[in-house]
């Protein structure tokens, strides 16, 4: 684990923020961005050293992370990063598909020319990241594009619900960002064109298929990993 943390960008917590929350947020981000991988053993002392804090807030954070589904605490073994099951992925990504399909439909109804121009810029960012093979940029670009579609949709309740599942969606997407990349960004192009035309039905259908393909791709990855174990 020490090697993974050393390789990751420094995430030492800042004191002005409430320490417990800062440690929790830092560990969550290390899991989401793949620095701490599913199934990995989490050693309190090493995490505390990496974050520049004592072991107590780390221990408390691990308890919260278990409640939130990020970590498994095993008696007499310790803490491990949770490995999502196929059923968990299907449930979460299924909800995401419903929410983002509606988001795309609303965006198609609301989008102004400047919104389409911004979507095109975000699309170019993603394509550039894909060409460079930069996973972190790919995930960031994907998140930015989907988030902007939600912004254009202009529905506060919808935005709140999407935000609730967004962090785990990013966690699931990170390991498949490169292998799914070319197909996914081609689908983004189709989605932007549908939104630009103001065709809510087509935009919703493109988004539905896009999210379903991502779900299927991720579930296949889980199945392949299970067969290797």
Image (spheres, rainbow, N blue to C red):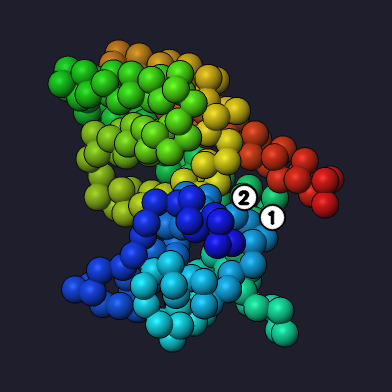
Q: Nearer the viewer, residue 222 or 189?
A: 222
How many residues crowd mark 2 within 10 Å: few (<14), some (14–19), many (20+)?
Answer: some
Q: Quadrant of residue 118?
A: top left
The N terminus, quarter of image: bottom right
Q: Are marks 1 and 2 in contact (CB under 8 Å)?
A: yes
Q: Using the image, tell me which numbered label, if any, was put on residue 89.
A: 2
**Mark pair 1, 2: CA separation:** 6 Å
Q: Residue at x 65, y 35 (%)?
A: 216
Residue 197 visible (yes or no): yes
Left/right placement of residue 128 relative to residue 98 reads left
Whether residue 109 is situated above or below residue 196 in the rendered picture: below
Whether residue 113 is situated above or below residue 21 in the rendered picture: above
Q: Residue at x 45, y 62 (%)?
A: 28
Left/right placement of residue 17 relative to residue 212 reads left
Q: Residue at x 15, y 21 (%)?
A: 114
Whether residue 213 is situated above or below residue 68 in the rendered picture: above
Instruction: Determine the secondary structure under disc 2.
Output: helix
Left/right placement of residue 123 relative to residue 32 reads left
Q: Quadrant of residue 179?
A: top right
| Residue 64 image point, x, y percent | 47, 76
Instruction: Determine the secondary structure under disc 1.
Output: loop
Q: Nearer the viewer, residue 84 or 40?
A: 40
Q: Quadrant of residue 113?
A: top left
Residue behind mark 1: 85
| Residue 110 image point, x, y percent | 22, 28
Q: Nearer the viewer, residue 205 or 189?
A: 189
Q: Nearer the viewer, residue 159 or 220?
A: 220
Residue 64 visible (yes or no): no
| Residue 26 image point, x, y percent | 39, 64
Left/right placement of residue 49 relative to residue 78 reads left
**Total marks drawn?**
2
How many residues crowd mark 1 within 10 Å: few (<14), some (14–19), many (20+)?
Answer: few
């Amino acid at each position: 684990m020490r090697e993974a943390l050393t390789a990751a960008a420094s995430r030492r917590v800042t004191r002005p923020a409430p320490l417990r929350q800062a440690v929790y947020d830092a560990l969550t981000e290390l899991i989401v961005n793949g620095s701490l991988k599913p199934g990995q053993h989490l050693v309190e002392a090493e995490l505390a050293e990496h974050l520049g804090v004592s072991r107590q807030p780390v221990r408390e954070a691990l308890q919260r992370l278990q409640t939130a589904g990020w970590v498994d605490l095993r008696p007499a073994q310790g803490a491990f990063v949770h490995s999502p099951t196929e059923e968990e992925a299907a449930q979460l990504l299924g909800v995401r598909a419903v929410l983002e399909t509606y988001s795309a439909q609303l965006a198609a109804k609301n989008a102004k020319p400047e919104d389409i121009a911004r979507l095109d810029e975000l699309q170019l960012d993603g394509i550039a990241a894909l060409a460079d093979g930069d996973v972190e940029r790919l995930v960031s670009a994907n998140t930015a594009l989907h988030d902007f579609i939600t912004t254009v949709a202009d529905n506060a309740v919808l935005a709140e619900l999407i935000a609730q599942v967004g962090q785990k969606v990013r966690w699931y997407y990170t390991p498949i960002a490169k292998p799914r990349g070319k197909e996914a960004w081609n689908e983004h192009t189709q989605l932007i064109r549908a939104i630009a035309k103001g065709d809510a039905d087509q935009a919703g259908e493109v988004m539905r298929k896009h999210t379903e393909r991502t779900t299927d791709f991720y579930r296949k990855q889980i199945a392949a990993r299970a067969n290797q174990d």
